[in-house]
Image: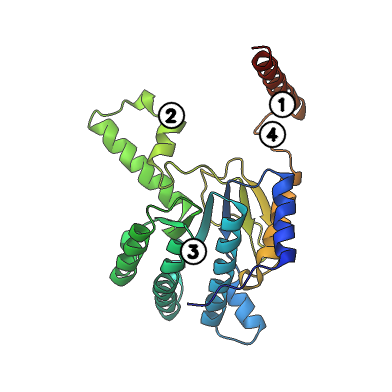
Amino acid sequence: MQKRKKQSSEDKAEQQHLLERGNIPRHIAIIMDGNGRWAKKHGLNRINGHRQGVNSVRDIVEVCGQLGVSYLTLYTFSTENWRRPADEVSMLMRLLLKALRDETDALYENNVRLLTIGDTDSLPEKVRSELCESVEKTASNTGLTLILALSYSGRWDLTQAMRKIARKVQEGELTWNEVNESVIENHLSTAGIPDPDLLIRTSGEMRVSNFLLWQLAYTEFFVVSNYWPEFRRKALYDAIRAFQRRERRFGMVSEQLQTSSSSKSSLLRSAIDAFTSL
């Protein structure tokens, strides 16, 4: 496993500035796009692009842990990716297997918990086995939760949730009029995980590519032209700064948010006054 570089004073200062501004995204999701195009640009074959992309994963996982991000979801392999040439799929599975073997100890030592979402039954047996071991080894960690979306798509997620709900209705555990947003959320593969606050997509493409279709309802988007192998912590800092400048209205208008914020401040002042008068 590669040795971690010592964090520079400049990098620490940049992180401190972000933390002082507040509003670090609790959950960041990333569509890691452009490995193949990066390789082509540098006269390499596609697998070299995927290998270089692992270095970006390593850096982004590390910096998210340093910033106190709670959840990081990486779109690692979609259900549509199975349609790629067989030799590329095979190399991707071998690369995933190697990454799990190389990085699990570091995840454990850095208090990172590993989870996975997707149709993992379709993965090769060796990959499934290594993945289970990595998830089990890091299960008690309490820092960043790293979620790998493997053989995943948003439509697959909604379909499997609907099937589970339909079965419960059929068996009398639920009635049709009890099915609401909360019930659906609890049957998605992301049950218990908060929706992403920030979605980052590399390579400049302006689409979600069947990723977290339910969960992205009010997520802030940030698209960069960098290919994924070029994406490092500096680019992540830019995305977080952009996120911190945005006003998240969740269907409301700015005046409502300001009123809500003022009400919270008034309640806080009242509580402080009441406490100091005791």
x, y percent for residue 164: 31, 41
Marks 2/4: CA distance?
23 Å
Q: Earlier in the sequence, mark 1 or mark 2?
A: 2
Tell me the CA gap for discs 1 and 2: 29 Å
Horizontally, is 252 left or right of 138 in the view?
right
- On screen, residue 212 above or below 218: below
Residue in front for this viewpoint, 29 or 105: 105
Q: Which residue is mark 1?
A: 261
Give the answer, above or below, for where 188 lies relative to 100.
above
**Which residue is label 2 attached to?**
180
For marks 1 and 2, give the one nearer the viewer.
1
Q: Residue 68: x and y, percent?
A: 59, 51
Residue flagged by tag 4: what amino acid is it? Arg
Give above or below for 237 relative to 191: below
Eye-nearest disc, 1 or 4: 1
First along the sequence among labels 3 and 1: 3
Q: Quadrant of the C terminus?
A: top right
Q: Residue at x 33, y 42 (%)?
A: 163
Residue occupying the point 46% across, 67% down: 106
Q: Which residue is mark 4?
A: 249
Where residue 229 sits: x, y (%)?
61, 73
